[in-house]
Image (tube, rainbow, N blue to C red):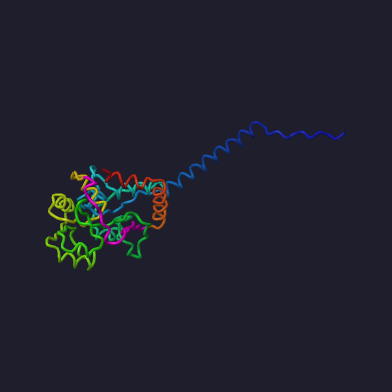
Amino acid sequence: MPRRRRLATIPDHQRGNSMRRFTFLSVLAALLALSISSARAAELTVAFAIAKPPFVYATQIGPAQADDKGGIELDIMKAALAPRGHSFQAVYSTYDELTALVLDGRADAAATVRPENPNLFYSNEFVSFHNVAVTRADGPTPATIADLAGLSMVAWEGATKDLGPAFSEVAVTSPNYAEMGDQKAQVKAFLDGRFQALIIDSTIFRYWKKVLGGKAADFQFHSLFGGHTPFVAGFADETIRNDFNTGLKEIRQNGVYDVLFNRHIAD
C-alpha cells in the first residue's frame, strides 16, 4: 500500500512574511501607477483670443481674473483635458498673437487657431464658425451671395476681405452697407430695423439675439458662404495634443460637447 505524502505546510512566521511582502508589493505597484498618472497629468497655460462671446467672454489681455466668465472654448477645453488628468490656466491675447505665445514658451497651447505652423502639434477640430446671412422671417430670402445685391447689410469689421470678392462686389451695390467691430452693436442695429440683412457667425448671432431679447422664430438663416470653417488647438507637446484629441473624441461621442456648446446660446 503506497504511503501518503504529507502536504507541506508553511510555518506561521513565513506565511506572515509572505503576506507582508505581497502587501508591500501591492502598495508599491499602486504608488507607481499613481506616480505615472501624476507625471502625465499637467497644469497647462492655454491662450485664448479675447472678446468673442459666447466663445470667449474676456475682454482684457492677460491672465484670467478671479471673476472670469469663461465661454464655450474654455468649457470644451476643460472637458477634453480632464479625462487624462490635465487642467489649465487661461491667458488672453489677440488672435494674431496666439501662436506666438506657444512658440516662445509663454503658453502650452493656443485655442481656436488654423493649423498653419509646422512647429506646433495641432488637434482635431475644436470649434467651427458658420457665417450666414440673417434676415427677418418675413424679409428677403437670398439663395446666393448675388441675391444680397441691393439689400442694406451690416457685417463684422473686415467681412468684405474675409468673405471674398463675390461678397465684396455685392457690398458695393448695397444702398447701406456697414461694418462694425462690436458684434453686439452689429446685432442690435439689425434687430432695431436699420438693416435688411445681417452677416455674422450663426452662434454669435444666437447668443446676442438671446441677450438682446430677440426670438428665434422671427429670423431666418441663409447659408451663402460655404460650410463650417473649422478651427483647432495648437500644442507645444505632442503627447498632450494626443491626450486632448482622445478627450475631445470622448466628449463628442457622449454628448457632453453639445451640452457645453448649447448652454451658452439656447433660448
Left or right, 181 with respect to 36, comes to left
Would residue 22 be found to the left or right of residue 235 on screen?
right
Q: Is residue 79 above or below residue 232?
A: above
The answer to which quarter of the image holds residue 67 is top left
Q: Which residues are magenta?
A: 215-236
Q: Residue furthest top?
A: 12
Residue toward you, 96 or 134: 134
Q: Nearer the viewer, residue 175 or 32?
A: 175
> Where residue 266 appears, x then y in whole percent?
28, 44
Furthest residue to the front? 138
Q: Is residue 109 above or below residue 30?
A: below
What x and y, as percent, mark residue 159? 20, 62
Is 175 colored magenta in this rendering?
Answer: no
Q: Is residue 223 magenta?
A: yes
* Count of marks placed on residues: 0
Image side of residue 14 versus residue 203, left or right? right
Residue 33 x %, y % = 48, 45
The N terminus, quarter of image: top right
Quarter that holds the C terminus = top left
